[in-house]
């Protein structure tokens, strides 16, 4: 790699880090993020929910969410509709009361997928540069700035034959239970 290219790369890394660094009022603030549930099994044409749990690992109270960005992850090519919670900003922009160490769970969106082949997918990415990002305001009015949050939502779409076998197994269990109830009754 040439000397000029190396210096350019270092410069870009420094700019990226400075843009993502929180402002001084949030010097100790970091976020842990979990998606609830963090694993969902879907049909090839289905809907999944993005429900996030945010943990305040900083030293000040969070009173509002002012910025949220979630990336699609690897399921993106099969998304037919992204339906945001219509009350997200009304419910979470202000009026929160999340003390340091507390967690808070909120609904972000329902996402429709169509014709996704069997396989494992990421519903929301956690790998740079496609991390979920969030910004919050604390109780003294300081804004965190844009903070990348770790955590990912994993989706699994089974082979159609697996879905069929599972349906047969459930049907068989239901018939066996019905037969046992009829013998007792």
Image (cartoon, rainbow, N blue to C red):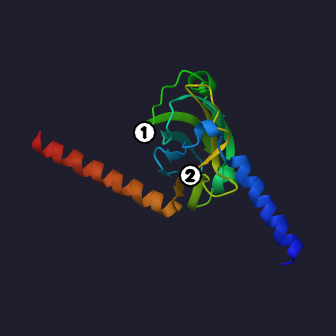
> Where in the figure is residue 51, as x and y percent of width and height?
52, 39
Q: Residue at x 49, y 63 (%)?
A: 161
The residues bearing labels 2 and 1 have C-alpha atoms spaced at a distance of 17 Å
Can residue 115 be seen in this snapshot? no
Q: Is residue 59 left or right of residue 137?
A: left
Judging by the rendered image, the residue that carries numbered circle 1 is 101
Residue at position x 58%, y 42% from top?
Answer: 27
Q: In the drawing, does residue 102 fall left or right of residue 28?
A: left
Q: In the rendered structure, find residue 9 and report the number of the disc placed on it.
A: none
In x, y percent, where is residue 6? Answer: 82, 71
Name the quadrant containing residue 126: bottom right
Q: Residue furthest left?
A: 184
Residue 47 against residue 129 in the figure, above or below:
above
- What residue is rendered at 54% in x and 57% in y? 157
Q: Nearer the viewer, residue 34 or 143?
A: 143
Q: Nearer the viewer, residue 73 or 97?
A: 97
Mark 1 neighbour class, 10 Å CA radius: few under 14, some 14 to 19, many 20 or more = few
**96 relative to 85 in the view: left or right:** left
- Of residue 108 and residue 3, the one placed in the foreground of this image is 3
Q: Earlier in the sequence, mark 2 or mark 1?
A: 1
Q: Where residue 110 appears, x then y in whole percent?
A: 59, 38
Question: Please, is residue 20 above or below residue 74 in the view?
Answer: above
Question: Label 2's element?
Answer: loop
- Secondary structure beneath disc 1? loop
Task: Point out which mark residue 150 bears.
Answer: 2
Residue 5 image point, x, y percent: 86, 71
């Amino acid at each position: 790699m040439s000397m000029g290219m190396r210096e350019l790369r270092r410069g870009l890394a420094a700019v990226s880090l400075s843009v993502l660094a929180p402002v001084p009022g949030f010097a100790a603030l970091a976020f842990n993020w979990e998606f609830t549930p963090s694993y969902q099994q879907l049909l090839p044409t289905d809907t999944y929910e993005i429900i996030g749990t945010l943990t305040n690992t900083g030293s000040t109270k969070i009173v509002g969410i002012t910025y949220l960005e979630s990336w699609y992850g690897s399921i993106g090519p099969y998304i037919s509709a992204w339906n945001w919670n219509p009350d997200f900003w009304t419910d979470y922009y202000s009026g929160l009361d999340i003390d340091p160490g507390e967690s808070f769970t909120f609904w972000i969106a329902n996402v429709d997928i169509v014709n996704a082949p069997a396989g494992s997918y990421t519903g929301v990415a956690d790998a740079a540069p496609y991390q979920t990002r969030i910004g919050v305001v604390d109780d003294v009015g300081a804004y965190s700035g844009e903070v990348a949050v770790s955590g990912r939502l994993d989706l699994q779409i089974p082979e159609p034959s697996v879905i069929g076998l599972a349906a047969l197994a459930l049907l068989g269990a239901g018939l066996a239970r019905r037969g046992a109830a009829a013998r007792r009754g």
